[in-house]
Image (cartoon, coloured by chain):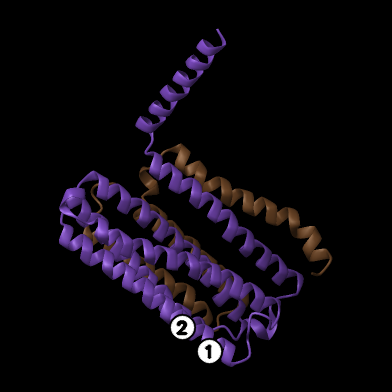
Amino acid sequence: MENTFSASDSIRTWVLLVVLFLVGVSAVAFGLPRELAFVLIFAAAIAEAYVIGRYYMRLRSEDVLIWSLVLLPVVTVIVLAFVLVPDIVRRGH
Amino acid sequence: MTESVAEVGVAHAAHEAAELSTSYEIGKLGMWIFLAGETMLFGGLMGVFTLLAFSRGGWGSDGTHVNWRLAGVNTIILFTSSMTAALAQGAARAGDLVRVKRFLSASGLLGMLFLVVKAFEYAGDVAEGFTPLAGLFWNFYYLMTGLHVLHLFAGVVVFFGMLLWVKPQNAGSWLERKLRYACLYWYFVEVVWVFLYAFVYLSPSVQ
C-alpha cells in the first residue's frame, strides 16, 4: 500500500473527503432535527479522520507500536473527560 | 570491574539503539510520539469545551454566530492542500523533483490561503464584538482555533523550508523520508481541523 498510493488515489481520497464534509455540513444547512444533526456531524468527522489516517497517514500499513501511539492518547482523553463529568456537569461551571 | 560493567552497559544500550533504528524509522517514531502529545493537547481542549457545553445546556446564541460557511471553505482548502502534499510524496517516490517542488509549493500556498481566510473570519467576528473576552465560548473558540492556526503556520514554514532541500543531490530515500515526516504533521493538522470544525463550528450552529 505504502508504495502504491498513486495520484489517482490521492484525488479519489480528496473526493471522498469532500463528500463526507458535505454530509456533515448538510446537518446544519438543512436544519435537520437536533439529535440527527449531531450524529451526522460527528459521524462525518470520524469518517473523515479515518480516511485521512488510512490513506494519507498510511496507518493501514503501520504496526502495533504506531497504532498504540495513535490510540493511547485518544483513549486517555476520553477517560479523562469522563472522569471530569461529575465535577463539571454537577457544579455547573 | 565497575568500568567494565559500565562499558558493557553502554555497549548494550548502543546495541539496543542500533536494533531499534533498524526495526523502526526513528524519525517517524519521533513524529508519532510528538503527534501523540498534540492529540492530548487538542483532545483535552475539545473534551473540556464539550463538558462545559453540557453543563450550560449548550452555548446558546454565542454558538450561532460562528461563520461555519467561511470555515467550510477553509476545510476544502485544507483537504486540497493535503491532496497536493500526497501528490508531492508520490512525485518524490518517482524521483520527479520538478513535480515535488510544484506540489509542495501548492500545499504551502494553500496553507497560506487558509490563514488569509482565517484572518477575514477573525476580523468579521471582532467587528461584530465577538472578541476573545466576549464570553466563555469565545475564549475557547479563539484558544482552539488560534492554536490550530499556529500549528498550520508552522506547517507552511516547514513546507517552504523543504523546498530548499529539493535538489538532485538529496533525491531518493532521504528526501522521501523528510517529506513523509512533514506530510504526516500536515495530515495531523488536517485531522485536528476536521474535529474543530465539528465541535466549534457545526455543533453550536445546530438549532
Whole-percent x and y of residue A24? 48, 73
SS label for mark 1: helix
Placement of B153 over or under B136, stated as above or below: above
In the rendered image, which residue does mark 1 sit on?
Answer: B124
Q: Which chain is brown?
A: A
In the rendered image, which residue does mark 2 sit on?
Answer: B70
Whole-percent x and y of residue B207? 62, 83
**Along the viewing direction, whichever of B84 and B165 lies nearer the viewer:** B165
In which quarter of the view is residue B77 placed? bottom left
Say which colour chain B has. Answer: purple
SS label for mark 2: helix
**Along the viewing direction, whichever of B107 and B169 lies nearer the viewer:** B169
Which amino acid type is shown beneath numbered disc 1? Answer: Gly
Residue drawn at (50%, 49%) of the image: B34
Q: Is residue A13 visible?
A: no
Residue drawn at (31%, 65%) of the image: B160
**Along the viewing direction, whichever of A54 and B185 lies nearer the viewer:** B185
The reply to whether dot 1 and dot 2 touch (C-beta < 8 Å) is yes
Which chain is disc 2 placed on?
A: B
Q: Nearer the viewer, mark 1 or mark 2?
A: 1
Among the two numbered marks 1 and 2 on one chain, the one whose residue lies closer to the N terminus? 2
Whole-percent x and y of residue B165? 25, 55
B36 sits to left or right of B163: right
